[in-house]
Image (cartoon, helix red, strand yellow):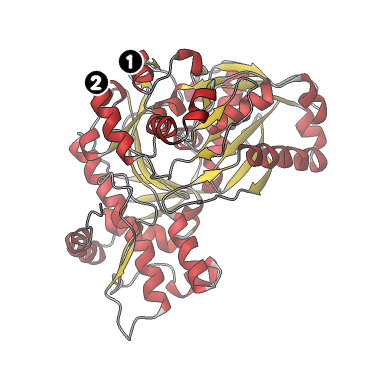
Amino acid sequence: MMYLGIDLGTSAVKTVLVDDTQRVVASASRSLATASPRPGYSEQDPQAWIEAAFATLDELKADHPHELAAVEGIGLSGQMHGATLLDANLTPLRPCILWNDGRSAAECRLLEQRWPALRATTGNKAMPGFTAPKLLWISAHEPEIFVATKLVLLPKAYLRLILSGEAIEDVSDASGSLWLDVARRDWSDEGLAATGLSRAHMPRLVEGCAPAARLTRELSERWGMVKRPMIAGGAGDNPAGAVGIGAIRPGTAFISLGTSGALLTPTDRIAANPDRVVHTFAHAIPAMWIQAGAILSAASCLAWIARLLGAPEAELLAPLGARPQAPSPVSFLPYLAGERTPHDDPNVRGMLDGLSHATDRTAIVQAVLEGVAFALADCRDALAAAGLAVAEADAIGGGSRSAFWLAVLANVLDMPIHRFAAGETGAAFGAARLGRLAVTGEAIAAVCTPPRRVETFEPERALADAYAARLPAWRQLYRPRH
């Protein structure tokens, strides 16, 4: 049997084809564009997701027809929090408002006033990235759209709707909506009512590894599949990444270095710390949760400086070598799209500090990588305040390809950082595992095993101390903007 994992990310859709020995047989990806019609806004066209996903599957059909024909299970992962609003004909009413959109700060305050039990119920603080405040913004600023909205879906649930004809969401992704009672793993009627909605506007909920719906007959025929594959509940991108690297037990932790970044640890209990902007999500496997510190810009900071300097990322990284010799004399705040943990500040913006006539390109690039690492140190400390001490972490996402960056992280966080082979395919691979579990019903621990670690980056005492000395001054650079 074969399994597909489709990851609907922010910058691309990635699809992997995995066999029953958990070998990635083939992969395909298509880039996605993001629009920012006003400062602080971030939107995508849902139709672009469908075209990109279908293009990856068409490519796999062309290059690996026999393997694709044997697919029996499909798992989906996706960027979390996006508000995809559909009318009575299940047609999108407007572009999707994404996770890194900051327009609904005022609505967050209103939502917490309307729903005093929000933090206790959801385990999270109301922030503009989450879905619920976006609906209050729509109600206030686009009332005709709000009235016409009959179904609210997160991005990957919209993809599943097109693939299967059914509106279904998994509990991990639903956790990022601010409508989920995370302990009960069910929609909160009180939370929905606070935004003028009801269960009738929501998809059906399932666990991430549970069977959800089958691929339509027409699409099964398009891609030459012998059977109509089962589509699993799937997961939000970070829970899917956790499944992909076997982070399914308490005591494990991982760093995601994608467009955004996060330090995450699975738990068998809810250890919420919303006041420090620690996120609480249901895991993609039953009776488990994920606690996370999240930053809105990670690998996207490197993409930004590469665009600004007009050079490929690899060209910028090459002069840095394999490891830092000392902290950069320049400091960088990575708040290009605002920040979540620990500030919850959609209006703050990035900064380069300490520039001089002697500053060269390499110092700036190193500062960008260090700024992301310092922001993850804030996440580490916020988790520690919730009683979750992280002693080591695995790294996934596109940023994990940089040995220099992982060496910086090991020293800034003062802990070993481990790298896997093909760590950047983590979410799609995790989704494929969920697709397999939905078909076979195997023991979760037997399927969700850790991949082989190929390298460990250990902190070096002198360098770790130098970064620890820099961290307080770096934190002093943050100034709220209102």
Residue 136 image point, x, y percent = 39, 30
In what element is the residue under mark 2?
loop
Q: Is residue 36 left or right of residue 120?
A: right
What residue is shown with label 1?
A: 190
> For the residue carrying disc 1, how many other residues have a C-alpha within 10 Å: few (<14), some (14-19), or many (20+)?
some
What's the residue type where badge 2 is placed? Ala
Is 404 situated above or below 395? below
Residue closest to the eye, 210 or 395: 210
- Count numbered badges in the picture: 2
Is 256 situated above or below 118? below
Residue 174 image point, x, y percent = 44, 25
Pick whichever of labels 2 and 1 is earlier in the sequence: 2
Q: What distance separates the C-alpha of mark 2 from that of mark 1?
A: 9 Å
Q: Give the residue at x 61% y 48%.
A: 32
What's the residue type where badge 1 is placed? Glu
Is 470 situated above or below 417? below
Q: Give the residue at x 29% y 70%.
A: 327
In what element is the residue under mark 1?
helix
Residue 182 image point, x, y percent = 34, 21
Residue 433 visible: no
Q: Is residue 251 left or right of residue 214?
A: left
Q: Are marks 2 and 1 in contact (CB under 8 Å)?
A: yes
Q: Is residue 408 left or right of residue 382?
A: right
Residue 210 image point, x, y percent = 54, 17
What residue is shown with label 2?
A: 117
Is 207 situated above or below 415? above
Residue 309 visible: yes
Q: Quadrant of residue 333?
A: bottom left
